[in-house]
Image (cartoon, grey):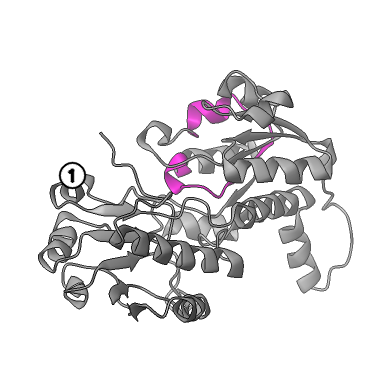
Amino acid sequence: MTKIVAYAIRDDEQPALKDWREAHPEVEVVDTKDLLTPETAALAKGADAVVVYQQLDYTRETLEALHDGGVSVMSLRNVGTDNIDFDAAKEFGFQISNVPVYSPNAIAEHSMIQLSRLLRRTKELDAKIAKGDLRWAPTIGREMRMQTVGVIGTGNIGRVAIKILQGFGAKVVAYDMYKNEEIEKQGLYVDSLDELYAQADAVSLYVPGVPANHHMIDDAAIAKMKDGVVLVNVSRGNLMDIDAVVRGLNSGKISAFGMDVYEKEVGLFNADWSESGIPDKTIADLIERENVLVTPHTAFYTTKAVQEMVHQSLDAAVAFTNGEVPSIAVKFPD
């Protein structure tokens, strides 16, 4: 019988795990709430594969511990692979998969909901109403259909965001180094980021956090944007120089900002700071601002997305153990 050890299984993943188990009685799945570390790798000794999801790095020590226990298949329940020591993974003969497409709608919807809220200034209105102030003025909003929205990245998530924007009636300008045929036919692409920045009233990001994109939104990029631009980032924290964004907010160059990811989010997000106070001064400051919406990396967090992440990762682990290469196998960098 195939045996899989699933690490860091949350309570909200249990229903999806239960469904998968019932559909695959020939596979034993041992689940634990523990993260995968060099120490907890011992739990997988003798197993055929591990299924994982965590922000901790998959270090050489961790991979070596798995390898020493006879495990060389690791299936991620998430998209990001930047926390894997690929040199060690190659050395130890690992096969790895991720879940690149679990629910583009979940992330795209969240980004557009946040953009809509920023345009209609709902955070300010909610605060006024909570105090008993039911006056409209001066909290006047903007209509989505009157905006030109720049979409950076037209992969699965970016294309869903474009459809949502078009449903509102917004004008869309898009940029991607790798153009999508459907978007190209619609004539939405511009030739450069500079051109997008010059046209867009709002900019939303849907690109990976690869080294080439590190801090693509910095002081220089913000300076090229329209005055009063609205920024939304639900992709990766390292896409933005957050200090540059703060400077843009302080100067008024950026009129509003929605963020679901943060470069220093590991150890900060998905933790309760209600008693001790948020230790990161930048995030604490941004949360207090009436024109900033902060969510703690929750864009993906829907029942459908969680189900897909669990099911696809387990399916891929089984495929590897059967000598197959799943469609979601990770290609190692050269």
Q: Is residue 56 visible?
A: no
- Relative depth, front residue between 58 and 186: 186
State the residue position of label 1: 87
From which residue to which does the magenta span run? 217-242
Residue drawn at point x = 46 percent, y = 62 percent: 312
Query: Which of the image's four quarters has the C terminus?
Result: top left
Circle count: 1
Three-letter residue code for mark 1: Asp
Asked whether, in this view, residue 250 is left or right of residue 238, the answer is right
Q: Please tell me whether residue 229 belongs to the stretch shown in magenta.
A: yes
Q: Position of residue 139 (x, y in %)?
A: 82, 53
Q: Is residue 239 above or below residue 51?
A: above
Dot 1 falls on a residue whose secondary structure is: helix
Q: Is residue 227 visible?
A: yes
Q: Position of residue 218 (x, y in %)?
A: 48, 33
Q: Quadrant of residue 191?
A: top right
Residue drawn at point x = 48 percent, y = 67 percent: 311
Q: Position of residue 261 (x, y in %)?
A: 49, 53
Q: Position of residue 157 (x, y in %)?
A: 60, 46
